Amino acid sequence: MHAIILAGGLGTRLRGAVPGLPKVLAAVAGRPFLTRLLDQLAQADVRGVTLSTGYMAERVEAEIGLEWRGMPVSYSRETEPLGTGGALRLALGRTPGDPFLAMNGDSYCAADLSALRAFHHARAARATILLTRAADTSRYGRVETGGDGTVLRFEEKGGLQTPGWINAGVYCLSRKMLEDPPAGTPFSIERDVFPALIGNGLYGFQGGGGFIDIGTPESYEEAQRFFS
């Protein structure tokens, strides 16, 4: 299986903490955050990875190069913001295989990615979202599933401060669901694609473990403790 990492975000909220760097290269416990995601993919025997870049793309390419722990690395560069769905659609041209893995470049979730892939295949899913348990879902939004993992509904951020399952930012996706929009069309996979797939091949895999993101200065500081 091949993978795409969304690594092109502006990281506006984090710039004061990591001036002069793209968010994915922010140092976390002594290492660029992106390298931890690449290690996770290499450990899951992913055959190759495409980095979807945008903001400060040259810095990312210079840091990572064309190979990581035996995995070929290619790059898909946005010339204008395309949203998560548009960025993945653009990167398909450099990413073989069906289905493929996709992950956000500013969050990490401990998980058995081979088990995620097996879950996706067993259900002939169109899209499978890795879910992890959170003590407070109000910051991330909640994902509710049926007994077989079928996604029933999404609850937006800012809801009740209660435990539940959240989207961990890691997906197993069929190519077909992203090939219809023309390349270069901006759209969000979370807002425009997943809700439309409810009841039509969208599943949630409750296999996520420890989860952290680096989207804010507060969570960035928390990430230092998480990985140390």
Image (cartoon, grey):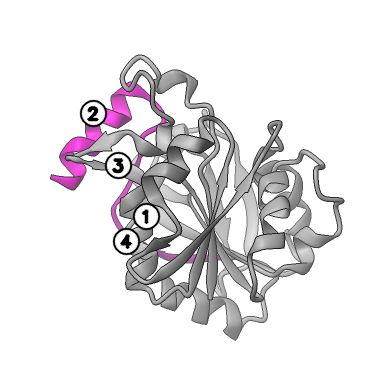
Q: Residue at x 54, y 70 (%)?
A: 2
- Name which residue type carries label 3: Pro
Residue extent of the magenta highlight: 204-228
Question: Mark 4 or 2 closer to N-term?
Answer: 4
130 lies left or right of 92: left
User: Distance from label 3 to label 2 (Cα)?
Assistant: 14 Å
- Residue under label 2, please give it: 221
Question: Mark 3 or 4 closer to N-term?
Answer: 3
193 lies left or right of 133: right
Q: Are marks 1 and 2 in contact (CB under 8 Å)?
A: no
Quarter placement of the C terminus: top left
Say few, some or many: other residues with alpha carbon within 10 Å of mark 2 (under 14 / 14 to 19 / 20 or more).
some
Q: Residue at x 47, y 26 (%)?
A: 11
Is residue 59 placed above or below 151 in the rendered structure?
above
Q: Residue 163: in sight, yes or no?
A: no
- Residue under label 3, please give it: 32
- Residue under label 1, please give it: 37
User: Distance from label 3 to label 4 (Cα)?
Assistant: 11 Å
Is residue 17 placed above or below 98 in the rendered structure?
above
Q: Residue 114: in sight, yes or no?
A: yes
Asked if residue 223 is among those painted magenta in the image, a careful observer would answer yes
Question: Looking at this view, is 135 or 123 the one in front?
Answer: 123
Percent across and percent down for residue 165 are 45, 52
- Name which residue type carries label 1: Leu
Asked if residue 151 is among those painted magenta in the image, a careful observer would answer no
- Residue under label 4, please give it: 39
- Name which residue type carries label 2: Glu
Query: In front of the other: label 3 or label 1?
Result: 3
